[in-house]
Image: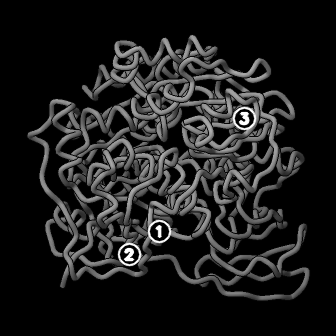
């Protein structure tokens, strides 16, 4: 599967409070409305101008903080096709896979704001079409490949009637 | 080959011998969510076509983050969650019951358990010798419905503690110091195992401040062995039968080893806006403080209130500073009322809010104004955390918070003892 879109570049230490600020806590049962406030404090223009397939590009420890699964879910709802970062906080990483949002680990220093990117999820290849740089992300562990292959944890459970992770 | 605490517990619940790096499907002893994450758990269970909870006595929902509800949206979430508990039989801890992690420690968690919570600070239960970790709402929905989850058995870091904390220095100072040293992603995916002679004199409450913050350096879990302190805590909460001794094998394999002399730790703060920006108070300089907050799953226990009350007794909160106290549970509320602690805090000029997460998550009860500075005992100081991205938060021990409330500026508590 191929994803193509513009890079939205962010720095190190993007927290789940950056992705989904706590002051919009009351909107958590209204995900489309919550999604309108995605990155409200770090990229106020993001929610209104992100396009389907665009790619969020972070630095180290992307998604640190709370366990709110609303963070990857609203990224997906805004149309984001994938997240790239140098490293992830573990709960966000797991939640992203469960939500069916691809999260790849690469050296994002080589990507600039607005670059046109193309990702091949099967091979982990990331192409920066603007600069010509090509990189390969390490594969996900098999368990996570199974879950994201099924379209996320909800689809996985619907398909198998329970966790089916042995191959 | 010897086992770490993480390998022992996950192995026992997976029903086989396991080593770090393996993927396992352990049974789950307790699963829980709150009013922020629970509605999504309910929604995802429905989406998965799951109606029933495997064992309702081991599943709980806590209404604590917006408690009592400040807005109609939260009220409707509370209504949904109450109905879910009624339908499935899951335990409901309604408003006033207290903060999820504190109540789970008091009533449910036991040594050797695997516990998952839809809240990142679920790792708190490691203070009782449980392998506990935070997950998202959907993972917790699966754990509630099937009674199991999947996990990668983490490598462990051994953190050996020696000596005793000096007067005016608390486990909050130690864990902030540790996070400052190792960094906000210094232990990502690892289990932290706190061992050694320095742990013997640390109560479960003091340990819980440490394990609560394990996630702030990226760790999956933070664990203490189950020993005499654990037994004492369970006795005090009427659960002596839940005790079993638990320790890692002497020849267990640890990825990294650290050793700390607790007597050398001094009062510190984490400066805004990251938990690993830690400095000794003496190096921070003059900081005028508008709001002081004592409470949360990190430091809202009776011991924490005692430590603040000891400093506030017979003194007054600075006229340009406000002191907000939010207790961790109904039990702590009652205990602090009966022993006069609440009176001391109120007479000093503080306001005592009901048990709950209150100001920490920026939902209500203490949202900062633009440019205001708060010194608080919580575990996070991220941008926007207390409801305003233009507010600034320093994290500290309850003693530092109390001393700061009196002085109106960031202060070393040792000057007040």
Front position among marks 1 and 3: 3
Q: Is residue B160 above or below residue B129?
A: below
* Quarter of the image that includes the N terminus of chain B: bottom left
Image mark for residue B374: 3
Residue B321 is situated, as x and y percent measured from the top left of the image, at 75, 23
Mark 1 and mark 3, same subunit? Answer: yes
Image marks 2 and 1: residues in contact by CB distance under 8 Å: yes
Q: Is residue B175 above or below residue B290?
A: below
Q: Is residue B148 above or below residue B306?
A: below
**Which chain does the residue under circle 1 lie in?**
B
Q: CA distance from mark 1 to mark 3?
A: 31 Å
* Quarter of the image that includes the C terminus of chain B: top right
**Is label 1 in a helix, a strand or a loop?**
loop
Q: Residues within 10 Å of mark 1 (few under 14, many from 20)?
A: many
Residue B80 is situated, as x and y percent measured from the top left of the image, at 45, 21
Judged left or right of residue A16, residue A155 is left
Image mark for residue B155: 2
Residue in the picture at 40% in, 73% down: B157
């Amino acid at each position: 599967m191929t994803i193509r879109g513009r890079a939205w570049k962010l720095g190190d230490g993007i927290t789940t409070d950056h992705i989904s600020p706590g002051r919009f806590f009351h909107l958590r049962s209204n995900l489309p409305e919550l999604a309108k406030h995605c990155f409200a404090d770090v990229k106020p223009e993001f929610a209104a101008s992100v396009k389907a397939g665009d790619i969020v590009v972070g630095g180290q420890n992307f998604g640190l903080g709370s366990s709110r699964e609303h963070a990857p879910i609203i990224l997906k709802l805004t149309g984001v096709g994938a997240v790239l970062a140098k490293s992830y906080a573990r709960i966000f990483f797991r939640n992203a896979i469960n939500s069916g949002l691809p999260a790849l680990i690469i050296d994002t220093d080589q990507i600039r704001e607005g670059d046109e990117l193309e990702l091949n999820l099967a091979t982990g290849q990331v192409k920066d079409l603007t600069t010509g740089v090509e990189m390969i992300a390490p594969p996900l562990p098999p368990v996570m490949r199974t879950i994201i292959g099924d379209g996320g944890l909800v689809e996985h459970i619907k398909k198998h009637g329970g966790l089916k992770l042995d191959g | 080959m010897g086992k770490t605490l993480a390998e022992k517990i996950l192995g026992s619940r997976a029903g086989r011998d396991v080593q770090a790096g393996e993927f396992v499907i352990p049974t789950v002893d307790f699963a829980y969510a709150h009013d922020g994450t629970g509605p999504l758990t309910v929604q995802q269970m429905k989406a998965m076509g799951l109606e029933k909870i495997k064992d309702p006595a081991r599943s709980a929902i806590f209404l604590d983050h917006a408690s009592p509800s400040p807005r109609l949206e939260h009220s409707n979430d509370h209504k949904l969650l109450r109905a879910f508990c009624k339908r499935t039989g899951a335990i409901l801890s309604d408003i006033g019951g207290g903060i999820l992690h504190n109540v789970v420690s008091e009533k449910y968690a036991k040594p050797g358990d695997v516990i998952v919570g839809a809240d990142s600070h679920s790792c708190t239960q490691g203070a009782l010798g449980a392998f506990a970790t935070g997950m998202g709402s959907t993972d917790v929905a699966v754990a509630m419905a099937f009674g199991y989850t999947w996990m990668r058995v983490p490598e462990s870091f051994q953190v050996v503690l020696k000596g005793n904390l000096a007067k005016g220095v608390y486990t909050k100072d130690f864990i902030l110091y540790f996070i400052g040293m190792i960094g906000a992603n210094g232990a990502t995916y690892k289990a932290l195992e706190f061992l050694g002679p320095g742990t013997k004199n640390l109560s479960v409450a003091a340990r819980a401040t440490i394990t609560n913050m394990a996630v702030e350096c990226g760790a999956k879990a933070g664990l203490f062995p189950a020993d005499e302190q654990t037994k004492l805590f369970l006795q005090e909460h009427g659960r002596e039968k839940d005790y079993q001794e638990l320790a890692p094998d002497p020849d267990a394999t640890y990825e990294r080893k650290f050793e700390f002399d607790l007597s050398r730790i001094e009062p510190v703060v984490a400066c805004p806006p990251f938990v690993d920006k830690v400095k000794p108070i003496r190096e921070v300089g003059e900081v005028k403080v508008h709001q002081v907050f004592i409470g949360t799953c990190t430091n809202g226990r009776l011991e924490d209130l005692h430590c603040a009350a000891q400093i506030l007794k017979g003194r007054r909160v600075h006229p340009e500073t406000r002191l907000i106290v939010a207790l961790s549970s109904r039990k702590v509320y009652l205990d602090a009322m009966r022993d006069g602690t609440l009176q001391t805090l109120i007479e000093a000029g503080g306001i005592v809010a009901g048990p709950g997460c209150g100001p920490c998550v920026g939902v209500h009860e203490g949202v900062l104004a633009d440019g205001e500075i708060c010194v608080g005992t919580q575990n996070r100081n991220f941008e926007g955390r207390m409801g305003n991205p233009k507010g600034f938060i320093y994290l500290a021990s309850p003693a530092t918070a109390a001393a700061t409330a009196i002085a109106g500026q960031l202060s070393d508590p040792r000057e007040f003892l």
